[in-house]
Image (cartoon, rainbow, N blue to C red):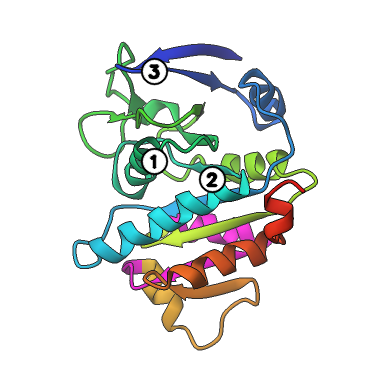
Amino acid sequence: MRTQTIDFSDRQTPVVFPNERSNLAQAISELRLRDSYPVIVLIGGEIDAQQVAGTRQAIETIARTAADLRAVLICGGTDMGIVAQIGQIRWRHGYQFPLIGVTPEELVTWPGGPHNTKFLWLGKQRWQLESHHSHFILVPGSRFGDESAWIGDAAALLSKGHQSVTILINGGEVSRKDIELSLENGRPVIVLSRTGHLADELARQPVRDKLITVVPAQAEQRIVEAIRAALALNEKNAAGV
């Protein structure tokens, strides 16, 4: 398993390249992360042009809650959509929670990184990694969605002794796969409605899985309460008392 450090303009960020999912525990150890955090998995894609303000407000709330709960936040690592937003918000507020980007190695690049596009299935260039993530796990694969099982495994490994939750903003078919895996593994899903596409589709369904909770993206306090309920944490736990 390879490891290296990426030199972004203002920081050095560790990255690991596990070859098999069985190597994931070692990869997490190489990143010097312990295996005992509340874990938030953030999924989705681009920010809907009609829902920008509400979506950004929701991501602000998620980031602040992750910081308050001393959680790990796992998402894709690319510099686009909600993934770019969570990285920028973490940096802008000086939050210290670990933000781990998990994405297929063959789809991405970074300063000094690869630019070969031979195996790309979509587009003609690799996606840049978002520079404000604290750690990256780059996994085998050349399609978005190849990382889904890895994200679920990482959430399970990092949340030993705690709980984990998946939060959906907007989203498409890859996010649908992520949700299916979350539900199969008993991980609650919070769907933020009024963010577009899959999130709004699920919000409209009259009958949903009991592990799915729908909350409007603009309902800040309800988002916080839903995350805390899913992670089974109260103010006393979060304060480390």
Q: Amino acid at mark 3?
A: Arg
Rate crowding at label 3 as few (under 14), some (14 to 19) or many (20 or more) other CA atoms within 10 Å: few
| Residue positioned 29% across, 23% down in the render | 118
Rate crowding at label 2 as few (under 14), some (14 to 19) or many (20 or more) other CA atoms within 10 Å: some
* Segment tinted magenta in the rendering: 175-197
State the CA–CA distance, disc 3 to disc 2.
20 Å
State the CA–CA distance, disc 3 to disc 1.
16 Å
| Residue where numbered disc 3 is placed | 11
Q: Amino acid at mark 2?
A: Ala
Q: Quadrant of residue 67?
A: top right
Precedes in sequence: disc 3 or disc 1: 3
| Residue 174 visible at all | no
Precedes in sequence: disc 2 or disc 1: 2
Mark number displayed over residue 67: 2
**In front: mark 3 or mark 2?**
2
Q: Nearer the viewer, residue 102 or 93?
A: 93
Mark number displayed over residue 6: none
Residue 231: x and y, percent? 68, 58
**In front: mark 3 or mark 1?**
1
Residue 222: x and y, percent? 51, 72
Which element type, helix, strand or loop, lies under badge 2? helix
